[in-house]
Amino acid sequence: MSATPFDLLREKREELGLLEPAEASALSRETLLKGVVIGAVLLGVTLGVWALLALRSTMQASRLEKLETVEAEVEQFETRLQGERAKLTQLNSANQELVKGLIGARSGSALMRDLQLRVPQGIQLTEATEQGSALTIKGKARDPQAFERINALQLDLKRSPLVDPNQVRLVKGSRQLQAGSSGGPSTSADTVDFELVVGFRPSIPPAAEKAILEELGSDGLARRLSLLEQEGVLQ
């Protein structure tokens, strides 16, 4: 008969309610296995969360990079746009200066035609000289009433669309004495030499300018204004 090994601690374990060594070892292994599983799960969850955070951070960094690229492109576009606007402003300014120059260039034919229409009978023009924004007119007025004829010319010039009515003035009017037919004392001439200074009127709208030029027969300059109007550079 085999003898059962005597366990002196069995009674003590039973008294204290402790498990048998084999049972305790199995329970410890089970507990350790559960701990390992739980730890692995927690580690996996942690790694998963970290991976998600890393992926999110990468995506945000990519988005930020794209936004920075877009901002840089917008800034470059705005810089180019400002440059084009500056060029356009400069071009418009140059065009307007050209238009002003063309409008301000008085037509000689229009001026001569206007003078021709306004010279009264008994007046002979001998010289017309343009100096800046004014015109110097010299001529002779025949008697009788020579000075009345000069005054009539002044009044008619003030009604000219090319002339500033406040800038028409007589600067000289004198009779030239001539010697008598028998060589005797000088006698009064039947003409009065005069000199007028006429100021041109300020600029007017191109449409009105063109109408005046057409009326006075200055077709060349009128056509130039029509072309500028078609190009849309007249304001």
Image: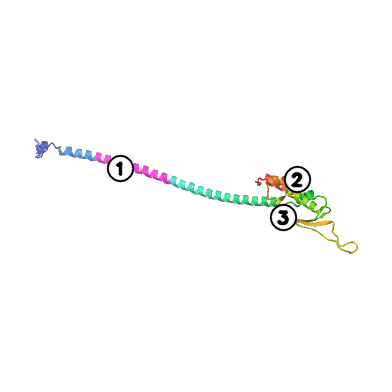
Q: Residue furthest bottom?
A: 183
Q: CA distance from mark 2 to mark 3?
A: 22 Å
Residue 112 visible in the picture? no
State the residue in front, 175 or 39.
175
Residue underneath mark 3 = 134
Q: Residue at x 25, y 40 (%)?
A: 35
State the residue in front, 179 or 103.
179
Between marks 2 and 3 in the image, the one whose residue lies nearer the viewer: 3
Query: What residue type is disc 3 on?
Result: Ala
Left or right, 121 with respect to 93, comes to right
Q: Secondary structure at mark 2?
A: helix
Q: Residue at x 53, y 50 (%)?
A: 79
Against 66, residue 133 (above or below) is below
State the residue in front, 81 or 51.
81
Between marks 2 and 1 in the image, the one whose residue lies nearer the viewer: 2
Q: Residue at x 42, y 46 (%)?
A: 61
Query: What residue type is disc 1 on?
Result: Leu
User: What's the mark number on residue 43?
Assistant: 1
Q: Which image quadrant: the N terminus? A: top left
Helix, strand or loop: magenta stretch: helix
Give the residues drawn in magenta, as a range. 34-61
